Image (tube, rainbow, N blue to C red):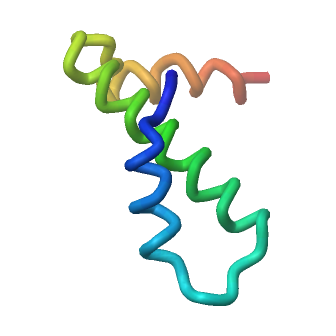
Amino acid sequence: MTIAKQQVLELIKDLPDEVDIDEIMYRLYLRQKLESAEKDIREGRLISHDEVVKETSQWFEK
């Protein structure tokens, strides 16, 4: 997934004047993950809460 240069500039513009590179990288990472999740929703790639509970409950069975 790519991000437009203008989007990066807007993201950086919203940051405080003093910020470290880790924060910038985190914000870019978070933006990418949110855009990816929104794409999955638009394309119908969803798992209901009940399905997640059912699948993960098996992880804790002894």
- Identify which residue, 34 or 2, lies in the foreground: 2
Q: Is residue 50 left or right of residue 12?
A: left
Residue 32 image position (x, y, % from top left): 50, 38
- Identify which residue, 19 or 9, lies in the foreground: 9
Question: Could you say which quadrant of the image residue 23 lies in?
Answer: bottom right
At 58% from the left and 26% from the top, the residue drawn is 57
At 23% from the left and 12% from the top, the residue drawn is 44
- Identify which residue, 11 or 40, lies in the foreground: 11
At 46% from the left and 58% from the top, the residue drawn is 9
Number of marks in picture = 0
- In the figure, 51 relative to 30: above or below? above
Q: Is residue 28 left or right of residue 44?
A: right
Residue 18 image position (x, y, % from top left): 68, 88
- In the figure, 3 relative to 55: above or below? below
At 24% from the left and 11% from the top, the residue drawn is 43
Looking at this rendering, what residue extends furthest in the bottom direction? 17
